[in-house]
Image (cartoon, rainbow, N blue to C red):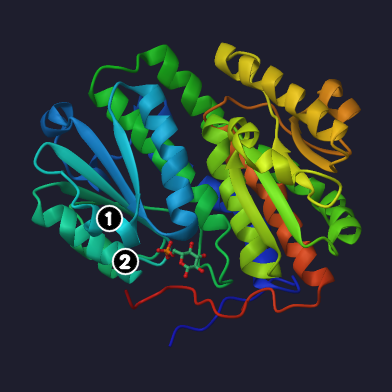
Amino acid sequence: MPTKPDKNGFPHYMLKEIFDQPKGLEDTILPRVSLDPLELRLADQVRISPDELRQVRRINVVASGTSRHAGMAGQYMIQNLMHLPVDVDYASEFEYRNPLIGKGEITIVITQSGETADTTAAQRVAQSKGSRTIAISNVVDSTIAREADGVLYTHAGPEISIASTKAFTAQMTVLFLFAAYLARVRGELDDAALRGWIQELLGLPQKTATVLKSSRQCEKLAERYHDFEDFLFLGRAIHYPIAMDGALKLKEVSYIHAEGYPTGETKHGPNALIDEHLPVVIIATCDRNDPGAVVRYEKNVANIRQFKQQSAKVIALATDGDAEVEAIADHTIFIPQAPELLSPILEIVPLQLFAYYMTVKKGLDVDRPRNLVKSVMLE
Ligand code: BG6
């Protein structure tokens, strides 16, 4: 039985693993990128020839829990970097929908442990239908990794706490690396764009270290909000999966009911719930270099104003220096400037910290929440 890693002085593995993320991202990115020569080094891991990759007509993503949220962010990354449709499925639902997949497709199976039974079964279904598979796993030589055609390991280090944190940011980073590699092979990413993305990727570990400085602010928010019984997490576009995982983290460890929702959907129902009893956590960052992000930002600001009119408490994630959101939200957590497709990797960190401190405030077992296991080995 492998011995558990040390907590490095942290009171819980969850907090240690949240603070491990700058190193995990560095170890996941550095071996795979180079500015001179300008290249992405994934071919030996993808193990599918460039010719075959150029023929691929669709990508399927299958996973469970937090890993599926990484897959949802990956869908935005792949579909924005190249013209290739991506479907994302719950591994536990995949075979039931009789997926019409086959040759000429790649199925990406994402799993921290590499042993989750639903995801193992989904990979076997995909292969039985003729699809190639690529596993993204944090455990070397795990079942899912051994059975896949290609394997992209996340080098986040051993994850002990049941709630997945550092594997999630590493999974989204690997998905972005794979999307850029595929776009490159398919001639849809030129040198200038690739150079820009590699420079942004190389900046992620330091920006994550900067976001971790919001730890004390997240602890204060937990002191303020640990008695509330319901939360709504909101995000648009690639930020929606982050809202989903922020809600999942809070549910998993603090047993507080929380829902992740696309911000634009609130007016189609959930808005009826929003008042002084339902705090809203909204992702309202903005990449000013991305016209679509600016349009979404304007809508988010309007939403925050409306939620305030309904007496809701609003906790907002905003991009560094954003005085407008800070002026209208009850609490604002600042996120370093980053491109729209990479900003989610930074945005989840304060939501992980918030869930952690809410759980500590409630005196619960942070690393071993009730009724959950690290890897569900039974379907
Ligand atoms: C659950 C864990 O058992 O499985 C979650 O509690 C995790 O944190 C989910 O996201 C999926 O696990 P894996 O290992 O397949 O990513």
Tell me whether the residue at label 2 lies in contact with that at label 1, contact meaning CB atoms closer than 8 angstroms: yes
Q: Earlier in the sequence, mark 2 or mark 1?
A: 1
Question: What kind of residue is marked 2?
Answer: Asp
Between the residue at mark 2 and the residue at mark 1, the CA separation in whole angstroms equals 9 Å
* Mark drawn on residue 374: none
Q: Is residue 40 visible?
A: no
Question: What kind of residue is marked 1?
Answer: Phe
Around disc 2, counting alpha carbons within 10 Å, would you say few (fewer than 14), some (14 to 19), or many (20 or more)?
Answer: many
Q: Is mark 2 within 8 Å of ligand 1?
A: yes
In this rendering, position of residue 341 left or right of residue 115? right
Q: Is residue 344 above or below residue 295?
A: below
Q: Is residue 209 visible?
A: yes
Q: Is residue 309 above or below residue 362?
A: above
* Mark drawn on residue 94: 1
Q: Residue at x 65, y 71 (%)?
A: 13
Q: Which residue is mark 2?
A: 118
In this rendering, position of residue 275 left or right of residue 239? right
